[in-house]
């Protein structure tokens, strides 16, 4: 036994000599020469991808209805005619919010998928290679798979199981997992943020090394640096961490750092992402179903703007004017998204999750504040997504100092939203149920007025009014409907409707599936007059717009397996982390030399 120990120590000493000259100050060169190391066996130049983290260039297919159905089940489908899933409108809205956010970077999906391939929860062979390094981004199925796993950072339970109490807690958890090599019982993706929560980036941790003198390294595959091995330095004496990162090897490094109080170093579970995810936007047939109480209202924000939610008790969740995150509402959650490409220090608003019961018990005030500077145009889009319902308000230019406020509450089955602003602008408003989408254009919102929206998805009853707006504008209403029997859509529009102060519009959208007559709306005037008109038919019975040229794969809706054939190369063919020809034994063949204990 002693001879085996000495042989392993000699081998590690050789590796330390070979790699030590490279230096580690810039986080880009790593040695596994320490005697106290827990190593999963993952290697970036074999188990990472050959391509770099990407945004919307090159143009990729991130998600389709097939991925949504796989993630949430058939309830996301308004129709499954012909074996194809046509998404409900809230599901489509949610998917498009995720796809839009992915334009800032796909680091989360790359980091998660590379780990799942290494730990044999899916296989590179499904995408045409023996290892992750063999795969090409041009493969559309691979693009969709990366998009799928990116999206699980916003789902429940997918992105909810975390360790972020302190750098030491992260270190200890990873050391325990990596101590079991490729047979670890839990797998983790790492999130790093700037101290204010911005600049989120996802990387793949794969080994922990005690460097002595209170210093430890967490070895990582950073998808902004394909094939390279890098490390996060942890000061175990001060419970702090630091990492030099950039959006690409061609850009200057910026320092990420933190400690136990900043909580900006986290690891998030992968096992909780493998099963079907909770569908917050799916309407339950039985409102008393056991999972109904677990559902959330989701608030997505894009553009240079921040969202802050306040309940009737004055408790808040979201971003303050200072940029600081606050969460005082029990059960609420802020999900800061990880992109890794938008530039160090750049911001993308987080997703806010609120317990669904809140809007039955309380009015929620949602304030959208512009964070734009100067005269640059700032399109700010806000989406409120709930079971069987979504409302989106798009402001073409939410300029510096402008604010949009949305008051949200529920009465029975009806969702109610009242929209206000501190300056005049014209929002484009869309209201979704599972089978209808109503888009309102041409409304003018003034500081003294508001736009009230009410939609009852169960009764399919829509109402809208403008209160206090002296010039409410000319309403242009567009409605699309889905036929659950065929998945076909029909589109109707109103004539331009000149509104007067305090006018109200109502419409019964029941029975507006294909084959039905054109729906009609009614306008109730403040003076007691009433006007009714039929909507014009724009199109009818249009087949569902299914993705074209999508590669087919047998059982493509279930790419994640509990057991898959081993596809990784043997340890003898795995190259070392620096790209040289020296091979490093995998964790299966190299015994751990001691279990690191950190002060």
Image (cartoon, rainbow, N blue to C red):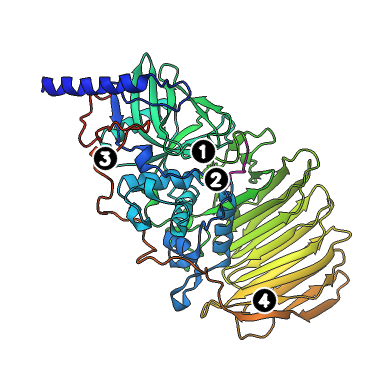
Q: Secondary structure at mark 4?
A: strand
Residue 351, magenta (yes or no) = yes
- Residue wearing tag 1: 201
- Residue wearing tag 2: 105
Q: Secondary structure at mark 1?
A: strand
**526 or 15: which is nearer to us?**
15
Real-space Cα separation, disc 1 to disc 4, in angstroms: 41 Å
- Residue wearing tag 4: 491
Precedes in sequence: disc 3 or disc 2: 2
Q: Nearer the viewer, mark 2 or mark 4?
A: 2
Q: Which mark is residue 573?
A: 3
| Contact (Cβ within 8 Å) of mark 2 with mark 1 | yes
Q: Residue at x 61, y 61 (%)?
A: 390
Q: Secondary structure at mark 3?
A: helix
Residue 174, magenta (yes or no) = no
Q: Is residue 103 above or below residue 372?
A: below
- Magenta span: 346-352
Precedes in sequence: disc 3 or disc 1: 1
Real-space Cα separation, disc 3 to disc 1, in angstroms: 31 Å
| Contact (Cβ within 8 Å) of mark 3 with mark 2 | no
Q: Is residue 367 above or below residue 511?
A: above
Disc 4 residue crowd, few under 14, some 14–19, many 20+, Cα 10 Å? many
| Contact (Cβ within 8 Å) of mark 1 with mark 4 | no
Q: Position of residue 202 (x, y in %)?
A: 48, 39
Q: Secondary structure at mark 2?
A: loop
């Amino acid at each position: 036994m002693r001879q085996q120990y000495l042989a392993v120590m000699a081998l590690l000493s050789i590796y330390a000599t070979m790699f030590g000259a490279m230096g580690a100050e810039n986080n880009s060169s790593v040695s596994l020469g320490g005697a106290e190391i827990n190593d999963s066996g993952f290697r970036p130049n074999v188990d990472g991808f050959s391509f770099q983290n990407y945004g919307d260039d090159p143009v990729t297919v991130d998600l389709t209805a097939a991925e949504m159905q796989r993630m949430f089940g058939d309830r996301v489908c308004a129709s499954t005619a012909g074996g194809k899933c046509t998404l409900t409108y809230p599901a489509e809205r949610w998917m498009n919010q995720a796809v839009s956010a992915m334009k800032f970077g796909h680091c989360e999906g790359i980091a998660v998928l590379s780990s799942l391939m290494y730990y044999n929860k899916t296989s590179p062979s499904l995408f045409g290679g023996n290892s992750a390094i063999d795969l090409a981004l041009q493969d559309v199925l691979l693009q969709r798979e990366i998009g799928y796993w990116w999206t699980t950072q916003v789902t429940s339970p997918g992105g909810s199981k975390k360790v972020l109490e302190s750098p030491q807690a992260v270190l200890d958890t990873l050391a325990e997992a990596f101590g079991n090599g490729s047979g670890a019982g839990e797998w983790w993706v790492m999130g790093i943020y700037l101290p204010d929560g911005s600049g989120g980036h996802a990387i793949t941790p794969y080994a922990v090394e005690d460097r002595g003198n209170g210093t430890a390294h967490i070895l990582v595959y950073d998808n902004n640096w394909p094939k390279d091995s890098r490390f996060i330095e942890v000061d175990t004496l001060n419970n702090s961490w630091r990492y030099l990162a950039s959006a690409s090897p061609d850009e200057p490094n910026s320092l990420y750092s933190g400690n136990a109080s900043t909580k900006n170093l986290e690891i998030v579970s992968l096992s909780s992402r493998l099963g079907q995810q909770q569908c917050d936007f799916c309407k339950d047939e039985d409102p008393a179903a056991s999972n109904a109480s677990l559902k959330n209202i989701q608030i997505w924000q894009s553009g240079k703007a921040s969202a802050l939610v306040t309940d009737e008790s004055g408790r808040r969740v979201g971003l303050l004017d200072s940029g600081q995150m606050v969460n005082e509402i029990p059960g609420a959650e802020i999900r800061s998204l990880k992109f890794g490409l938008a530039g160090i220090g750049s911001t993308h608003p987080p997703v806010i999750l609120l317990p669904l019961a809140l809007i039955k018990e309380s009015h929620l005030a949602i304030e959208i504040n512009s964070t734009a500077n100067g005269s640059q145009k700032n399109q700010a889009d806000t989406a409120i997504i709930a079971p069987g319902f979504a409302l989106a308000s798009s402001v073409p230019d939410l300029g510096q100092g402008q604010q949009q406020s949305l008051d949200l509450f529920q009465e029975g089955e009806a969702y109610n939203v009242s929209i206000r602003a501190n300056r005049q602008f014209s929002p484009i408003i869309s209201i979704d149920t599972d089978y209808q989408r109503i888009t309102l254009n041409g409304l003018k919102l003034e500081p003294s007025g508001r736009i009230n929206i009410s939609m009852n998805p169960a009764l399919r009853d829509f109402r809208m009014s403008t209160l206090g707006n002296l010039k409410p504008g000319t309403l242009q209403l567009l409605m699309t409907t889905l036929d659950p029997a065929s998945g076909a859509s029909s589109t109707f529009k109103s004539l331009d409707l000149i509104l007067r102060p305090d006018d109200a519009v109502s419409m019964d959208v029941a029975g507006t599936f294909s084959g039905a007559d054109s729906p009609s709306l009614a306008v109730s005037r403040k003076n007691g007059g009433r006007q009714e008109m039929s909507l014009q038919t724009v199109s009818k019975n249009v087949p569902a717009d299914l993705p074209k040229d999508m590669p087919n794969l047998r059982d493509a809706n279930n790419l994640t397996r509990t057991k898959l054939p081993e596809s990784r190369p043997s340890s003898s063919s795995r190259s070392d982390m620096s790209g040289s020809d020296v091979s490093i034994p995998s964790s299966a063949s190299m015994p751990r030399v001691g279990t690191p204990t950190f002060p």
